[in-house]
Image (cartoon, helix red, strand yellow):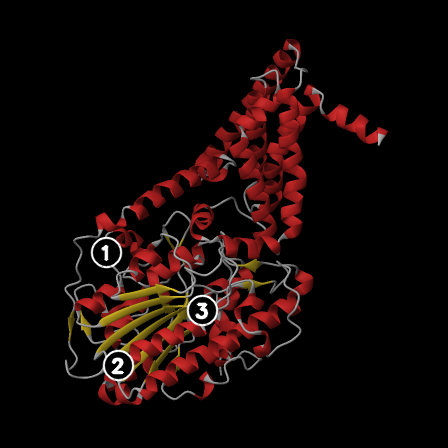
Amino acid sequence: MKRFKEIYQWCCEPRQLFFLFIIVLAIPNVALFFTEQMPLLVRICNIILPVSVYWMVMTLSRKPGKIIWILFPFVFFAAFQLVLLYLFGQSIIAVDMFLNLLTTNSGEAMELLDNLLPAVIGVFVVYLPTLALGIVSITGNKKLDQYFIYRQRRYARMTMGVGVILTALCYADHEDYALKLDMYPVNVCYNLTLAIERAGETAGYQESSKDFTFGAQATHDKDEAEIYVLVVGETARACNFGLYGYERNTTPLLDKTEGLVAFTDVLTQSNTTHKSVPMLLSGASAENYNRIYREKGIITAFKEAGFHTAFFSNQRPNHSFIDFFGMEADEWKFIKEDAPEETNISDDELLKLVDKQLNDGHRKLFIVLHMYGSHFNYKERYPSDMAVFRPDSLTDAKYENREYLLNAYDNTICYTDGFLASLIEMLQRTNASSAMLYTSDHGEDIFDDDRKLFLHASPVPSYYQLHVPFLIWMSEAYRKGYPVQYEAVCMNREKPVAGNASVFHSMLSLGGIQTDYKEDSLSVASKRYVIRPRYYLNDHNLPKLLDKIGLKEKDIKQLEQRRMMYP
């Protein structure tokens, strides 16, 4: 106890606090030195210049605690950055990470944090005592003497001079170097600014899109009974579907479903839900993402063509484009909205709402379903008595638990198999001309290789996050009535597809809807479909060719060999 008291008193000395606070703020810079794939000079500069600035700022008060609390946003950035490095292994806090804080509900956040205890505990151990010592410094009587401050300012200026020179060399030697992109925490502040701008643009969507119209018209027989369903899955990766040659039979029901076509080479254009799903629900894509701020979604196109429309989601509303596009429907419901935060509602509850729509006698019906699918925590996504693969009890996000996590994940795919099979059976019973398209917003990492990556939304995606399932089912009546579309789907099933860019146009083709905004060259239900270079929407909402986004060699190799995976 006496020893602890001595250590505490030593730590509370202003000079010790002065240097301690600089070190704590600089921890992310040191970590990024080892994690980022940047030239050595850039990584060295990323330590020298920021540390010199922290050093100088700490001399602005004789009480170091005042400065550390003034710099609280940077303390938060540091903690956030370290958690992300633990989770993804590289990269600074992205724009999408800030937006994820706004669009992720507290239940999802707690599920994730509960399973990232090592990182969370480590951050608390470092930064909570730092802030507490800052309060001690503010309320105490001890201060830094003026001579110490004068001397530290001199040292800080000298170090800053070295940092400025190194920065100039970075600009001279590396033409793509930019302070706002490559130096922490400048890049984080820049990303936060972009996130705020995007949030403002999103909030203004109702005004910017109020006069938009597709001018959509139906081309099918107006008296024919038609039902079309778009199912948006969550966090489902293609390589764990039995349909795609997975060693486990995770899709026994879909395997036997007549009229089902599985597309083998579909890649998502974003590994984040808040961007991928809106692209699936609209005409926006990585190549022209900004149209999302002024155009309405696919539901409005079907509505203009005379369809009764419905949107049902097993997610919570979060004031994002998913909500905006969903609420354009004649009927919409977020089934978790009125449930307690910790409640896990089965995706099968969505089928009850579909059943009601089918029984209401709508001659023309378009339904969009947004599943909870395979979102972490996997074990919470299916009833325990429906677990096919065991053991699945351990849920902590650790490499040692991969067997349990993979079993639970595969159980979610089995559950999705049952969900889609049940939906198809319901549509078959109507005897209507009907079609369903299912795809996922993105995939998932589950400690698949020596990188030990987990989850999705990492700044640089992996193959497992990009390769998604893409299924189209057509009823017998539809296949007989529209053989050209069925032949086109079968003809295009093995061609490369950018999922987000194709869903909008493919659904309009299946539904026989004509509009100037539909491009047959992007529709897999058209014989005019054209193979194009595939793009990924990066953190700054810029389209980047998939081979230009920093993919690791093993991911590129898997993408090149993916066709060999299928029978």
Q: Position of residue 298 (x, y in %)?
A: 26, 65
Q: What residue is drawn where x is 55% and y is 30%?
A: 50
Mark 3–mark 1 CB contact (< 8 Å): no
Instruction: Answer above or below: position of 325 versus 410.
Output: above
Gap between marks 3 and 1 measured at Cα: 26 Å
Nearer to me, 34 or 379: 379
Give the residue type that dot 3 points to.
Val
- Quadrant assignment, res 406: bottom right
In the rendered image, which residue does mark 1 sit on?
A: 295
**First reached walking from the N terminus: tag 2 or tag 1:** 1
In what element is the residue under mark 2?
A: helix
Q: Position of residue 163 (x, y in %)?
A: 55, 27
Mark 1: few/some/many CA within 10 Å (<14, 14-19, 20+): many
Give the residue type that dot 1 points to.
Glu
- List the single residue furthest toward the top: 147
Question: Is 390 on the left or on the right of 549, as rendered?
Answer: right
Question: Is 474 on the left or on the right of 136, as rendered?
Answer: left
Q: Which quadrant holds the N terminus?
A: top right
- Quadrant assignment, res 68: top right
Residue 286 in sight: no
Q: Which mark is residue 468?
A: 3
Nearer to me, 100 or 137: 137
Give the residue type that dot 2 points to.
Gln
Mark 2–mark 1 CB contact (< 8 Å): no
In the rendered image, which residue does mark 2 sit on?
A: 485
Q: How many marks?
A: 3
Q: Nearer the viewer, mark 2 or mark 1?
A: 1
Q: Position of residue 537 (x, y in %)?
A: 38, 55
**First reached walking from the N terminus: tag 3 or tag 1:** 1
Q: Position of residue 266 (x, y in %)?
A: 41, 70
**First reached walking from the N terminus: tag 3 or tag 2:** 3
